[in-house]
Image (cartoon, helix red, strand yellow):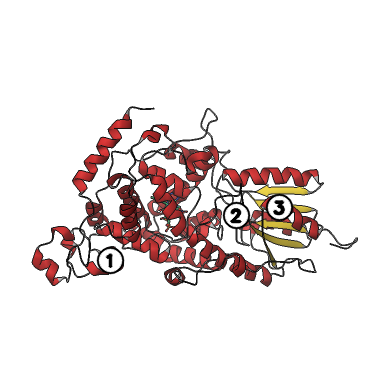
């Protein structure tokens, strides 16, 4: 407890905003000149937001360690607790004798319910409790149609967002160089005890090779993107072999960097360098816009995580097929682009966006397995598994979502590979057993002449699977199934 004469501390409750830079809640606390208590609560109980999957837990462990180090450098420890958030937060507030608590908002229904209730309970206790926007370019309730309704279609949503002008500049929230601690430090749990890293087996080797969770890692990714990739983003972002995208998604998911910082940094760099055209910049900002749109949908239609946005899909005749689902997860479908994507996901916790669309379409349409099964697999294995982006994107591919791709548009996994990875760079990286096939057949080994396969060291059905379903037949079966719900509302 603070002594009678010392000012009461402020609790900064970190959640999906694991950074010091451009963190409005932290900035509000710093402005007060009071001691700061930095708190993170792992809440996996009933009523809590969806528990993170395996890859996200790995990320969270390292991201919290990075945050703890960054906070220590500016003078305060990270207090880590586990338990139901409402009770645990109030407990910490009371132990600290805090007079004020601040946090950045979240937009999923369970998170909102907890925060709203907690805020009013804390206020009833006589405390100041405040929330801020640290995660979005615009609050979901600030972007409305002319009739005051939420948007259901991306293009007018994004136009309306832009009409509001550029998002706020982040500079006013620069990371503090020092914070006032409150001795003695409050008790804290060990990160490794709460979120153990995988050990038996240690499946995280590929994740470690690929990522540096934490604010410094996020800034490095942004710099690498601005330095080389942004100038070719619009032209090459669909080509999985070209490494043209930012790889910022997991950093954004855990709030290690703010979308405002990214938006303005990209604009500043484009203004300073002639070779970054408006086309490249606009395309990149539009993708940040898709993230905003997903959050807009999650906030206004909180069921999109589990229920079809278009109810007619409730009657869709999904198939249940555990073996086919297993082959899909393992990257053993016999379609090289699908297999490359699923193996990239397993190894790195990430998959290129174009390939995500193709593998999701394959599961939903070629195998007719419910999009929720695929969404759950992604939730467990993606390091960027995001409550808004993941579900909105799965529903988009399924055709059941808002502004979704029509169900009858069925990706051909062979021609998608030939179009977006014509030299087979991506497939050779992730399906090495096909690496010696010439580009002409790398996406259709099952059509390669026998001698070609022999020269490439491939035995179909042995070293690489034959296609698990025939494209034309699977496509027709999916279209027939769609006919059964087409006219339902
Ligand atoms: P960039 O191309 O560099 O884009 C910059 C940022 O914009 C991304 O980091 C991301 O935050 C946002 N963004 C880009 N594309 C989209 C999109 N289509 N929808 C929403 N936001 C987008 N993205 C996630 O962040 N988490 C998920 O769980 C997720 N699941 C997906 C599932 C499926 C089936 C599909 C088709 C897409 C999914 N996406 C998801 C969207 C997209 O694939 C990733 O955001 C993107 O591949 C991340 O790579 P990047 O950071 O290099 O993207």
Label 1 Cα crowd, 10 Å radius (few <14 / some 14-19 / many 20+)? some
Q: Position of residue 398 (x, y in %)?
A: 36, 42
**Residue 408 visible (yes or no):** yes
**Up-down: is 365 above or below 261?**
above
**Observer-nearest of 463 and 172:** 463
> Element at badge 3?
strand
Against 194, is 99 above or below? above
- Front residue of this view, candidates 461 and 185: 461
Q: Secondary structure at mark 1?
A: loop
Q: Nearer the viewer, mark 1 or mark 2?
A: 2
State the residue position of label 1.
431
Residue 102's disc is 3
Query: In this figure, which residue is indicated by the disc labeled 2?
Result: 44
Label 2: element kind: loop
Q: Nearer the viewer, mark 3 or mark 2?
A: 2
For image coordinates 39% across by 50% down, the residue present is 374
Specify whether 347 is left or right of 459.
Answer: right
């Amino acid at each position: 407890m603070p002594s009678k004469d010392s000012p009461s501390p402020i609790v900064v409750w970190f959640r999906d905003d694991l950074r010091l830079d451009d963190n409005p809640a932290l900035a509000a606390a710093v402005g007060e000149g009071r001691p700061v208590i930095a708190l993170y609560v792992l809440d996996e109980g009933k009523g809590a937001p969806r528990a993170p999957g395996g890859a996200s837990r790995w990320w969270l462990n390292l991201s919290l360690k990075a945050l703890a180090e960054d906070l220590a450098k500016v003078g305060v420890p990270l207090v880590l607790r586990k338990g139901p958030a409402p009770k645990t937060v109030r407990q910490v507030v009371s132990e600290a004798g805090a007079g004020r608590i601040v946090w950045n908002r979240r937009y999923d229904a369970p998170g909102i319910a907890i925060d709203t209730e907690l805020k009013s309970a804390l206020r009833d206790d006589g405390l100041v409790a405040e929330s801020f926007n640290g995660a979005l370019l615009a609050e979901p309730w600030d972007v409305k149609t002319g009739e005051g309704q939420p948007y259901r279609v991306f293009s007018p949503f994004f136009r309306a967002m832009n009409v509001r002008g550029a998002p706020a500049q982040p500079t006013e929230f620069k990371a503090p160089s020092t914070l006032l601690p409150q001795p003695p430090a409050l008790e804290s749990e060990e990160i490794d005890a709460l979120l153990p890293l995988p050990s038996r087996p240690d499946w995280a080797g590929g994740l470690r090779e690929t990522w540096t969770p934490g604010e410094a890692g996020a800034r490095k990714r942004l710099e690498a993107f601005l330095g080389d990739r942004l100038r070719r983003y619009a032209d090459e972002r669909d080509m999985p072999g070209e490494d043209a995208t930012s790889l910022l998604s997991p950093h954004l998911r855990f709030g290690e960097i703010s979308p405002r910082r990214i938006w303005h940094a990209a604009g500043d760099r484009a203004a300073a360098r002639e070779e970054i055209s408006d086309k490249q910049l606009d395309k990149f900002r539009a993708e940040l816009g898709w993230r905003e749109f997903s959050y807009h949908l999650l906030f206004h239609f909180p069921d999109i995580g589990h229920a079809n946005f278009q109810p007619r899909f409730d009657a869709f005749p999904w198939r249940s097929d555990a073996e086919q689902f297993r082959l899909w997860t393992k990257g053993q479908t016999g379609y090289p682009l699908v297999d490359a994507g699923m193996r990239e996901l397993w190894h790195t916790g990430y998959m290129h966006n174009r390939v995500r669309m193709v593998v999701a379409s394959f599961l939903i349409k070629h195998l007719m397995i419910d999009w929720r099964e695929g969404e759950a697999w992604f939730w467990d294995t993606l390091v960027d598994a995001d409550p808004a982006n993941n579900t909105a994107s799965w529903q988009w591919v399924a055709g059941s979502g808002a502004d979704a791709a029509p169900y009858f548009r069925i990706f051909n996994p062979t021609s998608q590979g030939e179009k977006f990875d014509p030299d087979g760079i991506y497939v050779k990286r992730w399906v090495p057993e096909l690496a010696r096939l010439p580009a002409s057949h790398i996406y259709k080994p099952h059509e390669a002449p026998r001698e070609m396969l022999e020269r490439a060291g491939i035995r179909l059905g042995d070293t690489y699977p034959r296609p698990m379903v025939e494209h034309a037949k699977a496509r027709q079966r999916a279209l027939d199934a769609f006919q059964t719900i087409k006219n339902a509302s």
